[in-house]
Image (spheres, rainbow, N blue to C red):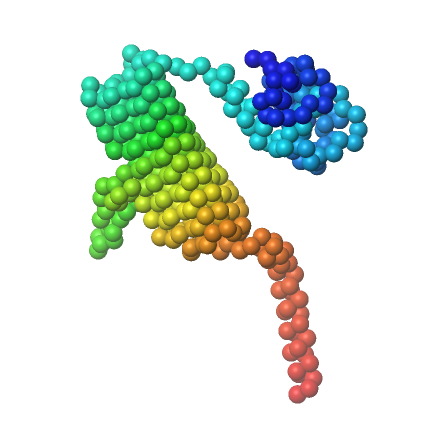
Amino acid sequence: MEFTAKQIARLIQGHIEGDENATVNAFAKIEEGVAGAISFLANPKYIHYLYETKSTIVLVDETITIEKPVHTTIIKVANARDCVAKLLQLYENGMRQKKTGIDSLAFISASAKLGKDVYVGPFAYIGDGVVIGDGCQIYPNVVISEQVTVGNDCIIYPNVTLYVGVKIGNCVTIHAGSVIGADGFGFAPNGDGYDKIPQIGTVEIDDNVEIGANSCIDRSTMGSTKIHKGVKLDNLVQIGHNVEVGENTVMSAQVGVAGSTKIGKWCMFGGQVGVAGHIEIGDKVFLGAQSGVPGSLKSNQALIGTPPMEKLPYFKSQALFQRLPEMYKELNALKKEIEEIKKQRS
């Protein structure tokens, strides 16, 4: 597919500086630009690449001042990152050919109900009482167990497993290897070992959720583990039983959330954040990578560390932590000096 600068500017409400008829058919990083590619510049720190790039078109934030001549066509926009994300989505939708039809090697229960224009790949399993909406893409080796419901326009990539009774909304994407609805981690100690606590609840995933590869969302003991609309989970995320994740919250890779915790709307968790169970986290809580959260947190905070603290005190603490060996030596030296002074006075 090929687009002109004029077409792109009209789509993203941008202002062209250069050749409005310049055409592109690919995307590239600004430092790796080639003829026929479109790139973007959102951080003035990297403006030197703008003067060197070979990309045909570059999207540039309006706040960035261009002080030297450039050899590329510029499209000034309010937010270059948002605009390139929009263009990438359009590009992907145009490139991806939606599959339809049921492969002869798939197994579909006679009691399952499939909507219009559904694709089911080879060796997929669809159990009794399953309901799948229109336009869904079920890739090879997917297992959809009994009584699962899947909404419209969902994409379920290879080797995903949906356990019994899981409920999936519309426009949900689940990447390869993820497991939705496995038993929550519930065991009661006895004299000889542990008694398993039956996990008889389910998992409910609302519309427009995306779940990364090899992530796990456990079914609840009773009721539902709930992932609300717009949530985005990265690869290798673990959501424990009875957890509730609020709308539009995002979690990076290897985040773990223990059971019965409630997380608010529009939260952002960096990689390897660990959240204890049976606590509440408010709306718009931003946690830096590897933060450990042992207790509840109020809304509208940006924190990092274990336990989480504001960024400035955290980085000051880290600077002091690195000096501890030196400070320990100084402390011992001072103690010896004090002991010597005491001996001289006695």
**Residue 13: x percent and y percent?**
61, 26
Kindly identify the residue that appears in the image at 23 percent across and 22 percent down.
Answer: 112
The quadrant in which residue 56 appears is top right
Q: Extreme right residue here?
A: 68
The quadrant in which residue 38 appears is top right
**Residue 304: x percent and y percent?**
53, 51
Kindly identify the residue that appears in the image at 59 percent across and 57 percent down.
Answer: 313
Kindly identify the residue that appears in the image at 25 percent across and 33 percent down.
Answer: 165
**Residue 62: x percent and y percent?**
68, 33
**Residue 317: x percent and y percent?**
59, 58
Number of on-image labels: 0
Determine if residue 197 is in view: yes
Q: State the residue in front, 174 or 142.
A: 174
Describe residue 109's horizontal placement relative to residue 52 as left or right.
Answer: left
Position of the N terminus by quadrant: top right
Determine if residue 158 is in view: no
Position of the C terminus by quadrant: bottom right
Kindly identify the residue that appears in the image at 38 percent across and 48 percent down.
Answer: 262
- Residue 186 higher or lower than 309, as above or below: above
- Residue 89 higher or lower than 242, as above or below: above
The quadrant in which residue 240 appears is top left
